[in-house]
Amino acid sequence: MELTIGREEDLRAYSMHIGGSQVVSERRMDSLDPYTGKVWATVPSGTASDVDRAVAAARAAFDEGPWGRMTATERARCLRRLGDIIARDAEELARCECRDNGKLYREMLGQWRYIPEFFYYYAGMADKLQGDVIPSDRPNFFIYTRREPIGVVGAITPWNSPGLLLTFKLAPGLAAGCTFVVKPSEHTPVSTLELAERVAEAGIPDGVFNVVTGDGTLGAALVNHPGLDKIAFTGATETGKRIAAAAAANLTRVSLELGGKSPNVVFADADLDLAANGAIAGIFGASGQTCMAGSRLLVEDSVHDELLERIASRTREIRLGDPLHPDTEMGPVANEPQHRKVLDYIEVARRDGARIVHGGAAAEGLGGYFVQPTILADVTNDMRIAREEVFGPILSVMKFSGEEEAIRIANDTRFGLAAAVWTENVHRAHRVAHRLRAGTVWINAYRVVSFAAPFGGFKESGLGRENGMDSIREYTETKSVYVELNAQPRDPFQLG
Ligand code: NAD
């Protein structure tokens, strides 16, 4: 494959988008390319007053603007146009994300090429959000329901897949008729700012999609804002808990997509080549920086050594390097704190008795924040490495004996985002899938998502679901309307 893209040297400078205007701020923040370690773009460091203005713009667009007056069919047309524009510009958007977060170009391009499908899917739903006619127990009342947009949404996203994770919120939210104030991660603000220009080009009116940039302090100003009707958050579980507490103060609706420590369970009757491939996809894809990472590999004791060797032998060949190069299989981790955190966890695991089968250190000589793909054996489920989310390329391998023990270990976690089961036995596959306490379970596969299937967490992995038919409900309120059919005065002192 040819190297099709490169890095331009000019520093890019971006503005925030508020109410259709480009807004700068006195203070600016740098966005670092994790491969070169150099600043490649700068963005404003927004303030609480920028959040006020953005929420006011979103409120005005919702209450008085053309968005609120548009028919759902017209809104759907805007969403389809936005999908087309993103498809046209997928390469540029992917490139911006690679430079911001160091993930592989081919991964980010795949995501941006898939994102239009979300807008087309929810465009199809926009004008089918119908209410019900209630079969009323009150013969003199005609009762019906309306599905109305929830209002102004504050959306906060992490750095690992900024465009895709925003789309999980934006596509159903816009289809429902909501307006947005978005705060992307301070590590990866650029693709969201680039998207704002394309939202305008799609004919979506000013004020419907506002972007403020800043760190967690700005995020906190947004989630504490009384002008929001809903918060849609993706990020770490501890941040999610703080956001849920802030939301409670104003009773703002909230959906949370949080962390994971997902079990990847391989039975002795599995196809071990497929399982080895799935284990690698689960933990070394995106350098392990995915919420659904299969960070705990549970292997039935009789095939443990064999599977471990197959995984180790493929891992030794993983090509680390420039994420923009098409031959690269693993890029750096996204930023310096993350790099430190991943290396610290390797030390913790070593001290707790884990055995390093491969990796176990920073990858030298590549520049940037590289960590070797690391396989740890002899891990037990009570070790910190098996209990806490690392968000890096560290695979913890554990043994089990029989189905009951596999399920017990798999479910012994505070998280419940995803899980996988590998077996050729169709009965066992479904039986185990039903007992795993996780929002997504793959059978003989790992790390697959679809706009059509609900995604979200059990337990401390989140609240609510994104994607699929139901997620649009997260962006609507149901209203019951009672129509009196008899023009007769009623007893005013009694419940009707
Ligand atoms: P993070 O929680 O540190 O930050 C996420 C976002 O929240 C950022 O925009 C940040 O600025 C903002 N933020 C930080 N503190 C805040 C506060 N007090 N109030 C409001 N906003 C605040 O997470 P991260 O390090 O960017 O991302 C990694 C985490 O995201 C991992 O835990 C990962 O599992 C999780 N994640 C979950 C999913 C999912 O769909 N479940 C997907 C991707 C990532």
Image: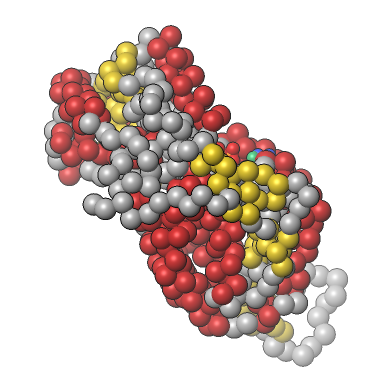
Name the quadrant where ligand 1 sits. top right
Residue 91, quarter of the rendered image? bottom left
Q: Is residue 233 above or below residue 368?
A: below
Q: Is residue 56 above or below residue 443?
A: below
Nearer to the camera, 326 or 258: 326
- Residue 39: % across, % down: 57, 42
- Residue 398: % across, % down: 30, 21
Residue found 53% across the figure and 56% down from its top: 191
Nearer to the camera, 391 or 409: 391
Does residue 387 appear left or right of residue 374 in this picture? right
Q: Is residue 325 above or below residue 383?
A: below
- Residue 272: % across, % down: 15, 34
Residue found 42% across the figure and 19% down from its top: 346
Does residue 289 appear left or right of residue 159 in this picture? left
- Residue 417: % across, % down: 44, 41
Residue found 58% across the figure and 67% down from its top: 197
Residue 216 shows in the view: yes
The total number of labels drawn is 0
Residue found 67% across the figure and 44% down from its top: 29
Please identify the quadrant where the C terminus is shown. Answer: bottom right
Which residue extends farthest bottom?
A: 487
Residue 452 shows in the view: no
Which residue extends farthest right?
A: 493
Does residue 306 appear left or right of residue 371 in this picture? left
